[in-house]
Amino acid sequence: MPDAITSPGLAEFVDSLETMAFVTPMPAAPGAIAPMLPRLIQIECACPQYGAIRIAAGSAFGALLASNLLAIDPSTPEALAASDDVLQELANITCGAVIRQRGLATDERLHMSLPTSEPMDTAQWDAFVAMADVQVLDADGHIIAFQTVGLEAA
């Protein structure tokens, strides 16, 4: 787990990742290299204020998660094919945990969208991880990034 929880939702993300796929992220070394074939996964929620969770990760990380869930080798075509779905499910689980934590003190209706996924190029990755509120993590040797937008700390 990262040494300091500095982003709203980061604790829920780390817990979701550890529970879902037995992977524990740590802070990445400065200047960590972008993953190959990065994807940006986003899910929106209202709990009760609007927010979004964004996860940027390479397809190889998604394949690692798929392999842990499906008990297959991460280098198989099946693991790579499931990569995007598994990353979206990670966003879904994280968002549900965030909503549960932040929604406990409200009677307002809570909402979450379906996760979306889009490819990123190197310039987009670099711009994303350069944002002050993005946490860059090393998860079993894979560089990933996490951000919340519009969510206040619980």
Image (cartoon, rainbow, N blue to C red):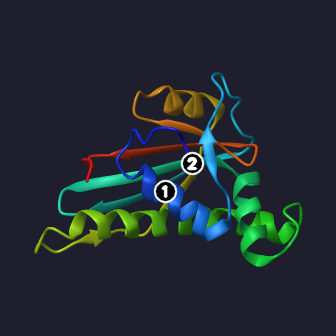
Residue 42: image quadrant is bottom left
On the image, the x and y values in percent for residue 154 come to 25, 54
Q: Secondary structure at mark 1?
A: helix
The residue at the point 33 percent across, 69 percent down is 112
Query: How far apart, in angstroms, are the residues tagged by discs 1 and 2?
Result: 10 Å
Q: How many marks?
A: 2
Amino acid carrying mark 2 in the image: Met
Residue at the outermost top position: 31
On the image, the x and y values in percent for residue 76 come to 89, 66
On the image, the x and y values in percent for residue 64 come to 76, 60
Residue at the outermost left position: 107
Left of 103 or right of it: where is 122?
A: right
> Residue 13 got which mark?
1
The residue at the point 68 percent across, 64 percent down is 22
Give the number of the mark in front: 1 or 2.
Answer: 2
> Residue 29 got which mark?
none
The residue at the point 52 percent across, 38 percent down is 3
Amino acid carrying mark 1 in the image: Phe
Identify the residue position indicated by label 2 in the image: 1
Residue 95: image quadrant is bottom left
On the image, the x and y values in percent for residue 63 come to 76, 61
